[in-house]
Each structure stands twice: as structure tokens, then as C-alpha cells.
Amino acid sequence: MEFKKLFFRISSQAADQLIIYGVLKEGARAKDFEMTVLWLCDCGLLHKVYRVTSPNLPLRAYEDPRAFKLYMVDIGLLSCMSRLRQDTLLAGNTLFREFKGSLTEQFVLQQLLTDKNLQISYWTNDQGNAEVDFIVDNGKSVIPLEVKAEENLQAKSLRVFVDKYRPGLAIRTSMTDYRKEDWLINLPLYAIETLGRKAAEDTHK
């Protein structure tokens, strides 16, 4: 029952990806669902993305095992479980903006996972007021990646990260076309699968 409860509640909390276990079961804590999460991830039904405390190589050495986000295995499955209407997805809706961001994150993660050379995490600062959606380790460098669902080019959290850690490459992905600025590259969502190659090119410069 816990497997089913957790799996089907993912979609209802997908706007944040951070699961509130007390909603699943009154008084529940993370450890109560530890084996359930492990089983669902091992079966390939969920993806777990850990928070990193510091963006250094190797990234896995800096993961916080107590802090992670859960993603569905597939964006179509997430949409179906959320009962998202096709016309809402295609035409847009002012009430759809927050969940649209979650769908976009899901899409980006799925594209990143196709590259087996990438280790994927996320980052928040100690104050909890800045979060970079994904931090990618390609074995030679650590790349911050901020996801935007539309053409919003603001990247405040990414700027906080860049100012603090000075990475060699910072990526924002959005519906906007490719553009290179002083401190980041905007990579269109349709081209996010090329991130690994782009990072390799940048490393060899």
C-alpha cells in the first residue's frame, strides 16, 4: 500500500518535487518511506536527485543523502497521473504556470539521463533562498543548469551560484533561442540533450 500511496502522490506534489511525507501518512517521516523510495527508484519508476552541499569534483562525494527531489520516470506518465488536459498543455493557462515549470524540469532531467556520462544533482544555498535546478558533473567540470519553462530570462539563483563559485560554464535552458552572454549560455529546451557535448567543447578550449 505504501508503494502505491507514494507513487501516486508524487504527481500531486510534483509542483515542488520535494515530498512532504506527513501528507502521505499522518505523522510520517522520511525514514518511514525509505525502503519504498528505494524500491521505486531501483525499479526505474522514480528518479532521485540529491542536493549537493558544494559543487566540487566528484559531485557524488558532496551529496546530502537526507535532501533529495523525486521525479517521475516519464513526463507523459506525470501528465496523465495529474489529469492534465491536452488543451491546457498546448494553449497554456495562467493557473498552469507553476506546474508547467515542473513538467519542464521533468523533461530536462529525462534528456540529461540519456547521457550516461553525466552525474546529476541540484544545489541550494545555506539560507535556502537560492536554488539551481540541476548541477551536472561530466567528470571534468561542474555545470550549473537553471530551467525556465517559457522565455523568462531571469536567472537570479544561477547568478548567486556563479558569483559564489565561478564555474567555467553556466547554462540556462528556456524557450528562447541560443544566446551567449558574459557569464552564461542560454541553451534552447529542444537542444538540452547537447549539454554534455557543449560542456566537453568548453572544457577543451
Image: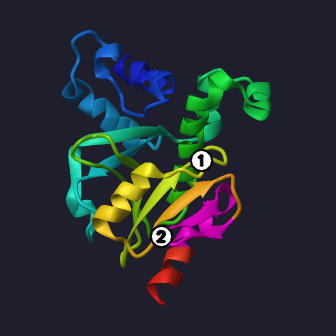
Of callouts 1 and 2, which one flags the residue occurring earlier in the amino acid sequence? 1
User: Tag on residue 183?
Assistant: 2
Q: Amino acid at mark 1?
A: Phe
Q: Is residue 36 above or below residue 147?
A: above
Which element is circle 1 on?
helix
How many numbered dots are placed on residues in this image?
2
Whether residue 163 is visible = yes
Quadrant in which residue 178 is drawn? bottom right
Q: Residue at x 28, y 16 (%)?
A: 22
Q: Residue furthest bottom?
A: 205
Name the front one of labels 1 and 2: 2
Q: Position of residue 163 (x, y in %)?
A: 33, 63
Q: Is residue 80 above or below residue 125?
A: above
Q: Residue furthest top?
A: 26
Quadrant in which the N terminus appears: top left
Q: Which residue is mark 1?
A: 107
Q: Report the side of 62 relative to 24 (left or right).
A: left
Residue 179: in magenta span: yes
Specify the segment rendered in magenta: 178-196
Q: Position of residue 108 (x, y in %)?
A: 56, 52
Q: Residue at x 27, y 27 (%)?
A: 33
Q: For this rendering, which residue is in front, 177 or 108?
A: 177
For the residues marked 1 and 2, what is the alpha-carbon distance in whole angstroms? 25 Å
Quadrant in which residue 136 is drawn? bottom left
Using a 10 Å C-alpha cutoff, classify the residue at mark 1 as few (fewer than 14 neighbours), some (14 to 19) or many (20 or more): some
Quadrant in which residue 158 is drawn? bottom left
Which element is circle 2 on?
loop
